[in-house]
Image (cartoon, rainbow, N blue to C red):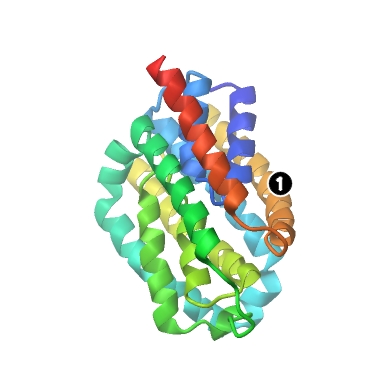
């Protein structure tokens, strides 16, 4: 990977991390476009630079995270299912799921169709929850169960948490913010586990690549999160569903051709 590749990767990850279009899926597709093999380091890179996106969320919600313990309780409750699944299936996820192009495209396509159908069905009501701390523990846990589906590349962690939150009676903005905050322990755990498994055996050049990717990811994610919170208050997720379907079909056509 050269510097241009690293910047492209970091921007793609930063844009897609918190949108319901799958950051992992887009990184796999980006690797395909740039002709970068899914080596062990590339897989490590894709996981570790997510810390930049996490830092952007901590920066934006620092006061809420520091002052509101109830928010943390709900976040950690939702994190439990993903933590168990991720820890148990870590090797399987990294060796067999990450980098699987056909699985990614299938997930993008089916997820796009499902996103559109669910958005058509969904109707927000006045009595839906407007504050994260008012989400019940049982509902937080259920949202966490759905997040576990995002171990499959192309599913989208964001979609897997926001959509269930909506149908469990949460306002759009609140569902998105809960998804953002839930990413903190989820990605920290994924990155930490990956670093431990890799035994920090990165060369100086690889550490530089990781640092550049981290910075690019932080800046991009920060801008996208601010835009997304404004967007979802006046728009549905149908456009994202259509986008997922188009991306999947275009890449299927290229592969078949």
Quadrant assignment for the C terminus = top left
Rendered location of residue 226, percent (x, y) = 73, 57
In the image, residue 148 above or below residue 29: below
In the image, residue 169 above or below residue 247: below
Residue 97 in which image quadrant: top left
In the image, residue 248 above or below residue 224: above
Q: Is residue 24 left or right of residue 103?
A: right
Q: Which residue is mark 1?
A: 219
Q: Residue at x 47, y 50 (%)?
A: 156
Q: Residue at x 63, y 58 (%)?
A: 236
Q: Residue at x 52, y 81 (%)?
A: 135
Q: Is residue 233 left or right of residue 202?
A: right
Q: Report the number of numbered marks.
A: 1
Rendered location of residue 168, percent (x, y) = 47, 75
Which of the two residues, 235 or 21, is positioned nearer the viewer here? Answer: 235
Which of the two residues, 104 or 197, is positioned nearer the viewer here? Answer: 104
Rendered location of residue 137, percent (x, y) = 43, 83
Q: Residue at x 30, y 49 (%)?
A: 90
Whether residue 18 is visible to the viewer of this picture, yes or no, is: no
Whether residue 59 is visible to the viewer of this picture, yes or no, is: yes
Label 1 crowding class (10 Å Cα cut-off): few <14, some 14-19, many 20+? some
Rendered location of residue 174, percent (x, y) = 62, 72
Q: Residue furthest top?
A: 257
Q: Secondary structure at mark 1?
A: helix
């Amino acid at each position: 990977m050269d510097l241009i590749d690293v910047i492209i990767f970091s921007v793609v990850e930063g844009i897609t991390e918190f949108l319901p279009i799958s950051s992992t899926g887009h990184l796999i597709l980006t690797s395909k476009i740039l002709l970068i093999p899914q080596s062990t380091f590339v897989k490590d890179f894709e996981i570790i630079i997510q810390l930049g996106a996490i830092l952007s969320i901590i920066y934006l919600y620092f006061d809420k995270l520091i002052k509101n313990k109830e928010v943390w309780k709900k976040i950690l409750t939702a994190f439990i299912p993903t933590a168990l699944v991720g820890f148990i299936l870590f090797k399987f996820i990294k060796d067999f799921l990450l980098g699987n192009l056909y699985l990614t495209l299938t997930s993008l396509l089916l997820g796009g169709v499902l996103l559109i159908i669910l958005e058509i069905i969904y109707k927000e009501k006045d009595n839906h929850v407007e504050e994260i701390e008012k989400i019940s523990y049982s509902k937080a846990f259920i949202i966490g169960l759905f997040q576990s589906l995002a171990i499959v590349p192309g599913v989208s962690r964001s979609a897997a948490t926001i959509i269930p939150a909506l149908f469990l009676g949460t306002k759009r903005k609140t569902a998105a913010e809960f998804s953002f905050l839930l990413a903190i322990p989820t990605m920290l755990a994924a990155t930490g586990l990956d670093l431990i498994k890799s035994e920090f055996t990165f060369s100086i050049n690889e550490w530089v690549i990781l640092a550049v990717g981290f910075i690019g990811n932080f800046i991009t994610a920060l801008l996208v999160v601010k835009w997304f919170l404004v967007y979802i208050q006046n728009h549905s997720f149908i456009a994202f569903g259509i986008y997922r379907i188009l991306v999947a079909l275009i890449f299927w056509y290229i592969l078949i051709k």
